Amino acid sequence: MSDPTQLMIYRNLLSSIAEEMGVVLQKTSYSPNIKERRDYSCALFDHQGQLLAQAAHIPVHLGAFSISIRAAMEEVTFEPGDTVIMNDPYRGGTHLPDISLITGVFLSGKKPTFYVANRAHHADVGGLAPGSMAPATDILQEGIRIPPVKIEQGGALRKDVLQLLLANVRTPQEREGDLRAQLAANTIGTRRLTELAKRKGLVTLQRSAKNLLLYSEKLMRAAIRTIPNGTYEFEDRLDDDGQGTVNIPIRVRLRIAGEKATFDFHGSSPQVKGCVNATKAITISAVQYALCSAVGIDIPINEGALAPVTTILPEDSVVNSSFPGATAAGNVETSQRIVDVLLGALAKALPGKIPAASCGSMSNLTLGGTGADGVPFSYYETLAGGAGAGPTWDGQDAVQTHMTNTLNTPVEALEIAYPFRVIRNSIRTGSGGEGDHPGGNGLIREIELLAPARMGLLTERRILSPYGLDGGKPGQTGKNLLKRKGKSTWEKLPGKAMLTLEAGDIIRIETPGGGGYGKETTPRKKAIQSKSARSGKTRKSRA
């Protein structure tokens, strides 16, 4: 294995390529969801499809990527200049709006030496409703499902494939712009890897990549050895699936034995009718994220980090769905609950080191229709919530947590791009759980429609609260409210819904707060919290 200095040099060289790919994708994209929220991820893979390096993007995308790469390798013969497009959740995808582009990098021989790839959430991929995030009952209602197929061949765009895709979406111009941005990102990734191989030598680059995998594995094995041997169990539940099934359990049994960790999800709910089913790739992503976060050391995130980890998943379950299970919310909502369950188990294994539950929902809102100019629009956003407090820090207010790593869309960007008026965007004061360290507060966002639209809601933690730890109180549940034009009262909406709205209607989303940590013991602390609640000021995290 190379010396640590060399390893860190190559770690940063490779991750910088992924970061630059992300900059290109963001700067050249069309949709606010990608350009402003940065709902995309970029990564590099070796010739076997193993994750080598990633940008600091979205955990739920990145942990699933290797399964997609291998599916593409099995079903498509890559040649120089080829790029494969895919979004199939049963082949390593997350949900249909997340479209992946995979390019083979040929540096020696007839097969790719490396692969570069990116995954971006498109604001519409067809299906039942604008935004492709409706409470569907099977995947065929959720949009166009793309198996691995070449969208670029020999360096030339396949217009027939592009036309097929654009014929199945509501906003084809925006979709084409975002797809071309994804192609540009892979082009720069291919160029930079080629330059790096010429500068450092291909043999040296390949050897260093292999050593990085071994280094991550070595660090993870050492980290797992610091966790006491034993079995640790935890269970939490989803509110519902939007189709009548409620209190949906997700259960994990964590076994630590020396330098190996096993996560067994037996006891979790069977696959449900609604769209909260998570794929195998999503659950593995959550395991990678939770464990790497919990061990508290800087491990390069690549395939090697998962080598000492075994994940056992029941077939046809809410954590390992199969066709034709609907998956739109499995990626955005169930992934968050899986993390809550994993951190709950790890909190038993590592007491005093793991934070309380965060908001536990990406609070997905979609709106789509046709503006006064006759141009169709499709808006998608995840709304931030409160972060869970930890042993030595307060939870942050109104942030994207855990399996998402996106930004809050600026109000100005929304009002420029869509026929909306944002009339309130504020901290939901007092929604964080009380404790020696209080949970972070959620967000309140009110949007007034200036044109008719179809609205989709996929939200969680509207019934079951985010848990506190070590005596800390739960965070408050979220609320979805609607005020019709000319009305003075708010109508309470369910967590998962699809509605037709008119111009002048106002949608209000109040996102959940994070759980508190520690039993509050000092009057001064409580007085500070009360003052903060009365003043409406945002607390600053001490993390």
Image (cartoon, rainbow, N blue to C red):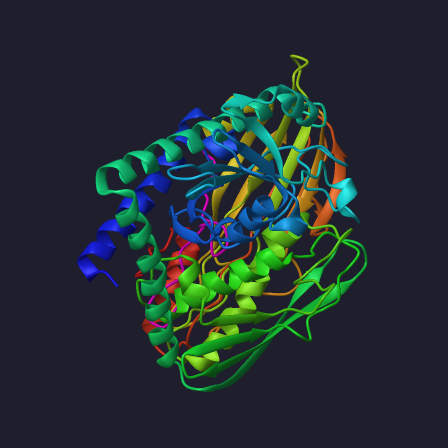
**In front: 530, or 135?**
135
**In front: 375, or 80?**
80
**In front: 248, or 26?**
26
Question: Residue placed farthest to the top in the image?
Answer: 373
User: Is 158 displayed left or right of 54 in the figure?
Assistant: right
Residue at the image position 28 percent from the left and 34 percent from the top: 195
Residue at the image position 29 percent from the left and 40 percent from the top: 197
Where 40 sits versus 527, above or below? Answer: above
User: Is 320 displayed left or right of 303 in the figure?
Assistant: right
Residue 243 percent across, percent down from the top left: 80, 54
User: Is 251 displayed left or right of 104 in the figure?
Assistant: right
Q: Quadrant of the C terminus?
A: bottom left
Q: How many marks?
A: 0
Residue 327 percent across, percent down from the top left: 69, 50
Q: Which residues are magenta?
A: 388-410
Q: Is residue 461 visible?
A: no
User: Is 281 displayed left or right of 103 in the figure?
Assistant: right
Question: Residue placed farthest to the front in the image?
Answer: 109
* Predominant secondary structure, magenta span: loop
Q: Quadrant of the N terminus?
A: bottom left
Residue 347 percent across, percent down from the top left: 46, 76
Residue 216 percent across, percent down from the top left: 35, 63
